[in-house]
Image (cartoon, helix red, strand yellow):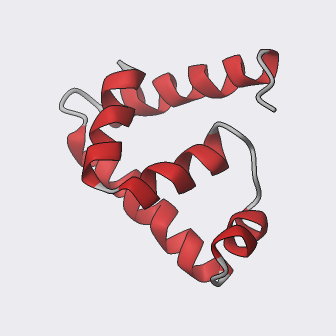
């Protein structure tokens, strides 16, 4: 389910997808992402807000399903380090 949601997000907006993964899967801070994209922390926070809002709207059953899937991805990323 998480893969379907993330693929849908990627097709919607690649930058939203990249920022969302950097924050929630790879664990970068908002400041680190802002530095990478050479923009303000507020701009990254706005992207994350819009992304979460979009994902909640895409979830037909309940918003908890999306967050449970993303939590699973986050927890798995702690065991499989990406270098």
Q: Quadrant of residue 35?
A: bottom right
- Asked whether 82 or 26 is in front, the reply is 82
- Residue at 47 percent of width and 67 percent of height: 47
Residue 12, x across and y down, in percent:
26, 52
Q: Is residue 69 left or right of residue 14?
A: right
- The quadrant of the image that shows the N terminus is top left
73 is higher (above) or lower (below) than 33? above
- Residue at 75 percent of width and 52 percent of height: 28
Residue 41, x across and y down, in percent:
67, 78
Q: Is residue 23 left or right of residue 12?
A: right
69 is higher (above) or lower (below) than 24? above
- Residue at 71 percent of width and 68 percent of height: 36
Q: Quadrant of residue 5?
A: top left
- The quadrant of the image that shows the C terminus is top right
Residue 7, x across and y down, in percent:
33, 33
Residue 65, x across and y down, in percent:
38, 25
């Amino acid at each position: 389910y998480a893969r379907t949601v993330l693929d849908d997000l990627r097709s919607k907006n690649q930058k939203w997808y990249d920022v969302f993964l950097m924050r929630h899967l790879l664990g970068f801070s908002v400041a680190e992402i802002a530095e990478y994209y050479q923009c303000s922390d507020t701009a990254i926070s706005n992207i994350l807000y819009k992304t979460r809002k979009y994902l909640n709207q895409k979830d037909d059953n309940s918003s908890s399903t999306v967050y449970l899937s993303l939590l699973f991805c986050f927890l798995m990323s702690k065991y499989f380090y990406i270098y």
